[in-house]
Amino acid sequence: MTRAVLDTGERHSVAELEDLAYELRRKLLLLCGTYEGAVHIGGDLSVADILTALFHHGLRIDPNDIANPARDRFVLSKGHAAVCMYIAMSMRGFFSYDEIVATYGQLDSAYGMHPCKVQLPGVECSTGSLGHGLPLAVGMALSGRARGELHRVVTLLGDGETGEGSVWEAAMAGRSQKLGNLVAFVDRNRQLMTSFAEERVIFEPYADKWRAFGWNVVEIDGHDMGQLVAAIDALPSPDSDLPTVVICETVKGKGVDFMERNLAWHAGSLGADDLERALAALDASRASNASENDTEAQEAR
Amino acid sequence: MTRAVLDTGERHSVAELEDLAYELRRKLLLLCGTYEGAVHIGGDLSVADILTALFHHGLRIDPNDIANPARDRFVLSKGHAAVCMYIAMSMRGFFSYDEIVATYGQLDSAYGMHPCKVQLPGVECSTGSLGHGLPLAVGMALSGRARGELHRVVTLLGDGETGEGSVWEAAMAGRSQKLGNLVAFVDRNRQLMTSFAEERVIFEPYADKWRAFGWNVVEIDGHDMGQLVAAIDALPSPDSDLPTVVICETVKGKGVDFMERNLAWHAGSLGADDLERALAALDASRASNASENDTEAQEAR
Amino acid sequence: MPVTFTFGEMLSARSVIGSTLAELGETHPNLWVLTPDIGATLVEFRDTYPERFVDVGLAEQVCVGIAAGLAYDGNIPVVSGMLPFLSMRALEQIRTDVCYPNLPVKIIGTHGGLVGNGGSTHYAVEDLGLMCSLTNMTVTSIGDPVMVGEIIRQSMDMTGPLYIRLAVGKKDKVLYEEGQHEIRIGKGIVARDGSDVTLFTHGTTVSQALDAAEQLAEDGVSVRVVDMFTLKPIDVELIERCAAETDGRFVVLEDHLAYGGLASRIADVVADRGLRLTSFERLGIPQVYAGFGEDEQLRDKHGYGLSATVGALRRAVGPATRAGADEPAAI
Amino acid sequence: MPVTFTFGEMLSARSVIGSTLAELGETHPNLWVLTPDIGATLVEFRDTYPERFVDVGLAEQVCVGIAAGLAYDGNIPVVSGMLPFLSMRALEQIRTDVCYPNLPVKIIGTHGGLVGNGGSTHYAVEDLGLMCSLTNMTVTSIGDPVMVGEIIRQSMDMTGPLYIRLAVGKKDKVLYEEGQHEIRIGKGIVARDGSDVTLFTHGTTVSQALDAAEQLAEDGVSVRVVDMFTLKPIDVELIERCAAETDGRFVVLEDHLAYGGLASRIADVVADRGLRLTSFERLGIPQVYAGFGEDEQLRDKHGYGLSATVGALRRAVGPATRAGADEPAAI
Ligand SMILES: Cc1ncc(C[n+]2csc(CCOP(=O)(O)OP(=O)(O)O)c2C)c(N)n1
Ligand SMILES: Cc1ncc(C[n+]2csc(CCOP(=O)(O)OP(=O)(O)O)c2C)c(N)n1
Ligand SMILES: [Mg+2]
Ligand SMILES: [Mg+2]
């Protein structure tokens, strides 16, 4: 078996991907500034880099051929990051960003707080209730296997979400069914909705849990685009035997200093002032990243 | 805090406990020979030694004071081994064996296929649906802690049962709540109802799972009374911080050769012929154990 | 190989499931069978189509989740297990992953009602109420073992989810001769015609209902027995017709809580359509956890066994006192 | 510290829960509060009684299981969370670990109905049907935020389980003046008296029902509004009385599937008691997954908003055509 050839868009350099992630965050904040209701900003910002790496680099998908049986499947298990996914997908050509901004959360909109496949073809399944994505992904991976596809099924979970027992049932099933075509990214931002991880729920030793459930474990900095790309490129072949989890160390609210590691920004709305502050913070964070990168580059020389 | 003083019965030597376990198995088979319906013989026989060690050695309980707040709590999470527990408890003075045999499974009997606290005071809670016992035990352990009791809450799970996600939720909760007074025995007989472990569901590396969930892990031969007693005696203090799992390597159907590791004997009934064969097999197994023990004793000399 | 059977014979509904699935595996390459360690009678399918058989062990939630994932990709998954656990442990998965996207997942299981002597953890007594609560779900409860195969076969063309409830399924009476009745999801079966009173029932109690009708016939009372094996969508038209044709006398008998199951489905129709009944009585499990005992003993103990059924039918056709009308039921 | 409030004012039911629990924590040393990561408004309790506060993170099943374990040992555990998840993910734990042994565990949560704009995974629209299916469970749905506190206080003496459903609970209208009505679990509240038709409702739609009644009053129609905040046990006596006193005209309005909730509870009584109604109409969520939108928009879209309620009341008192009697409802 060889992996199907899909038009998977242009190849981007890491620097380009970083720009796309910046753009994604910016668009996200702008939407929050327009929409009156609450948006899960914290958990959106923590996965902006992961979603960029997936939609612009990792996933073999074609926005013009969304039902291609050979496509990779993406399941947003942490469904509350829907709007970040919508925007990432719009940047990849699936949807129109303007339409998202114009209709988000409104009556009859396809773009709501959680992904709804019934209303929005292009997303692979409806999620939002935590703990459902990985089981669904196991089913899709099994199906692809049986049909002889070499696609991958990729899902993205919140770390808090992995408190759900259904996740560990699915972890065991993915291993037992020998699904090397199954890949779970975990957004390890060490925050739940109302507490920090390890404060009320002890998740550590976290990677060991996945290892003990028989998964191939990769640990990276989930905001380092180079590491994300490298992890994706190094994924074992879809016809191998072990599912892979990529544990991404992240920061909830990443890129907007006053939201970072701040329980108040699990979900929220941005008034005009907030929006301005947030955009400024985003630019500042980008500038400091750039200078860090320069230093690293110099040091590497 | 000191552990409450309860009349916890006579102290038994390991050899005496072995005799009690033999007696338990015998009584179990005799009941199966009388009762017309199916009994979960396989999973009963695999926990006969564990239940003997608990009810005659490990648990601080008093059959004449079943509501003593300082008592240890026992939760049979693998509720289908109820009859084995009833008999073990009868041998400890809780119930009458004759009454169990006379009424088991009958209309209005307190002794049914799964423990029912509503009908049978003395059992701590109603179980039977797998995956419920550990969460209940966590609640009981928390409660004891809060009341300043130094009791233990001990539960017994099937290995297949630990496929349930609710077990891992409870494992995480037991660790997060720092319940050193919580002890789980796992009957690791490597069989589920319709398959052998690792055949359809991959549990290995099994002990690592519990370790990764932050538990204190003890691994023993679940049919070696000496090891059972030692493991119980070495349990960390109830006011320590880590829950303990005692993973007992066992054989489903243990003690009756034609039932051992035989999927057909997950549940069954014993006709007169079967009963005779089973009792004979039990005696044979006891004799061979005794001679093994002799050899071991000689070698140790 | 299709099951052969004789009218009145005892047959195992479980083995009908097993052989029907094995048969359909051949014609439907997208048929999958999944189970949470309750696979004893699925062996034929398992061994013929191992790559489409998934035993997840004790893990009902992921079992249904996987089924949904398979269905998203064009497959027809059948989840087979024990209903008390499937209908409750996996309820959110059934609702959110299967019913919401309206996927053709079938849930088939045993232990519906006070059967099997497992005690209250092991009886599915509220399952039909739970399943009827779910949008897009088709809900059936089947007594005749041959019919189980027939319904599974019919369901291959369904686009949405289906729930099939059985009792123990080890030994069930074949109730209908081949071709005797049109068997169609959504249509009740007039298992025995009659004109004085209608006895509605489903699943394991159909047989008991027929026996009760036979007893009443000896008294010269003509009882219509309706096997309302589809609870959702409910056959409104048949209910209305029975009200008109059996003098507004209804008795509902079911091995399910008396509230939430078929009797409540019929009560919904009674209220919606403004049916003016002469009598309405429900026989089913009262608001208790039932304890141990053999199936028939428990039915007798809890007031919906054969003699209670006969009694209710007598009351229904007797002088016009509304049965149970004096005391508010404890609902 | 008790909440102070003014009639008609907007209050957060969530903060009422938080402050009531904090208040009761003092008088009830065996009161525990548990949550699966939905603890924002429980902070007062958490910080005052940290040793009796348990946040298990995302893990609804064990949350209920722990509550049961605590209750076995003499405690009064309150589990607080979002109802779509508590009522379904933890259903078997609620049934088997709490209801079967009849333990005094209280499940209190938000997101009952099409509220909060979270989409279909986040609406509890079948929860009341599910909970009414459970033996021993007392089921309530409360609109008035002050009443929430009152019911929690009353429930401290209950020996069995209790379910309390709220809408979003961030901003709710205080509906009843203090002492205006006797508030007692199991007894419906006549929120507004009237003689032409009874409008039964509960929870978040009580306020809408009162508005509709006000509109009808302008037409000279006298609408009785009954806040049937206890769905189980249902107030049979009040239903019978309303049938007699409002000319057999019933409209049922609820932010729940139109089948399975209050309307079906009332239909059960109608059938059991043989009530001869003049009209019966149910306004609630049809058999669809509702999608996104603000609460009021969704109610309007799905046919149970204010104007639909007014319309149904007009039909009920209008010329004697039975509303909806021509077409079988899709149930
Ligand atoms: C089953 C379930 N319970 C509760 C919620 C409400 N909820 C949404 S996000 C969230 C916190 C999730 O934490 P985590 O998975 O770490 O994601 P993050 O917030 O970090 O993005 C909660 C409790 C939900 N969506 N599903
Ligand atoms: C939730 C649930 N699902 C299914 C069953 C039926 N069942 C009873 S025992 C058993 C096998 C359990 O395996 P294990 O836990 O290893 O116990 P053992 O049979 O080895 O004693 C099954 C599937 C059950 N009791 N509960
Ligand atoms: Mg997180
Ligand atoms: Mg086992």
Image (cartoon, coloured by chain):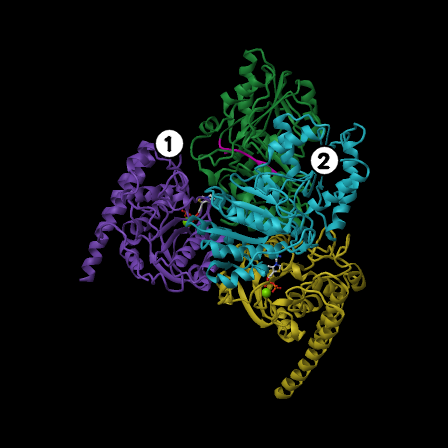
Chain colours: A yellow, B purple, C green, D cyan
Type of the residue with mark 1: Glu
Depth check: give the residue in front, D124 or C85. Answer: D124
Q: Of A110 and B31, which appears nearest the observer?
A: A110
Q: Nearer the viewer, mark 1 or mark 2?
A: 2
Residue D194 tag number: 2
Q: Which mark is residue C212?
A: none
Identify the residue shown where x is 20% and y is 60%. B299
Q: Quadrant of the N terminus of chain C?
A: top right
* Callout 2: chain: D
Residue D251 at x, y percent in the picture: 72, 36
A183 lies above or below C145: below
Task: Name above or below for residue C296 compared with residue B197.
Answer: above
Kindly identify which chain the residue marked by label 1 belongs to: B
Disc 1, SS: loop
Q: Which residue is disc 1 drawn over?
A: B36
Instruction: Tell me where residue D221 appears, x and y as whole percent.
Output: 78, 35
Q: Main secondary structure of the magenta part?
A: loop
Looking at the rendered structure, the number of numbered marks drawn on it comes to 2
Reply above or below: C322 against A200: above
- The span picked out in magenta is C163-170
Q: Is residue C270 left or right of residue C64?
A: right
What residue is shown at x 76% (from left), y 36% (from top)? D313
